[in-house]
Amino acid sequence: EVQLVESGGGLVQPGGSLRLSCAASGFTFSSYDMHWVRQATGKGLEWVSAIGTAGDPYYPGSVKGRFTISRENAKNSLYLQMNSLRAGDTAVYYCAREYCSSTSCYLDYWGQGTLVTVSS
Amino acid sequence: QSALTQPRSVSGSPGQSVTISCTGTSSDVGGYNYVSWYQQHPGKAPKLMIYDVSKRPSGVPDRFSGSKSGNTASLTISGLQAEDEADYYCCSYAGSYVFGTGTKVTVL
């Protein structure tokens, strides 16, 4: 059974840093691209970052330069280092596995999320 | 990329059908058959309901169906049931993922 378990969320002051983790199990972690998606309270889903199997990272403009995604295949773990945090980064952060082939791409499994609150 | 446009809410009585639209552009929804739909109950993680516009993962009831015409994708729930009351998000892959604004489905 595929499982993704996020941790590391909490309350942080504006300008501060936080590192999220996602522990994966039930599949060959090293064979899949992984993503972070966030959701502010009462709002929609927003793609935050992705990392390929070779460790190549991708970010939208809203977090580029502030967030760093990484993975440790030996530990079946995904990370998100968040720096220079702003109130607008307050959200539940989900990690998600991507299934992608030559004809198909989608996020098939999601964790339960971890809440990040940026406030003074 | 801008969020895909969905209606804020739709509603229907048990047994009825409801359809949720998802409008994007030729750069996302209209350009690729990589449209997926997610169901989210309050306080829960999103759950994949449809992928590749119209395919259902194992375990998803066949009352959920998807389609696409031009830059607009649609999710139809036939034979609405109480447990279908949730938020639904469309998603398009175009190098990165862009999500819809979300639709609340209410079962009357």
Image (spheres, coloured by chain):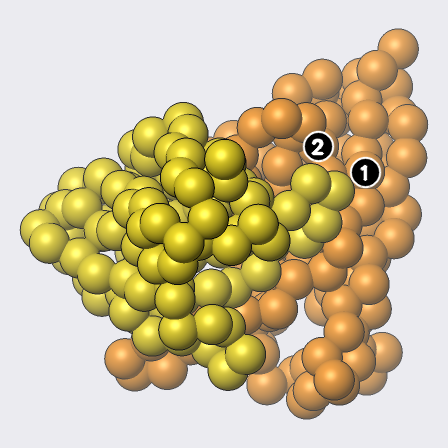
Disc 2: host chain: A
Q: Position of residue B20 (x, y in %)?
A: 32, 43
Question: Which quadrant does the N terminus of chain A fall into?
Answer: bottom right
**x then y, percent, for residue A88:** 65, 20
Q: Is residue B48 left or right of residue A102?
A: right
Instruction: Name which residue type carries label 1.
Output: Leu
- The reply, left or right, for residue B27 in relation to residue B88 is left
The residue lying toward the viewer, choosing from B53 and A7, is B53
Q: Is residue B36 visible?
A: no
Looking at the picture, do discs 2 and 1 lie on one chain?
yes
For disc 2, the marked residue is: A91
Letter of the orange chain:
A
Quick check: marks 2 and 1 in contact, CB under 8 Å?
yes
Q: Residues within 10 Å of mark 1 (few under 14, many from 20)?
A: many
Q: Nearer the viewer, residue B16 or A113?
A: B16
Q: Residue furthest left?
A: B70
Palette colour of chain B:
yellow
Q: State the residue at coordinates (26%, 42%).
A: B21
The quadrant in which residue B100 appears is top left
Residue named by callout 1: A115
Which residue: 28% across, 69% down?
Answer: B54
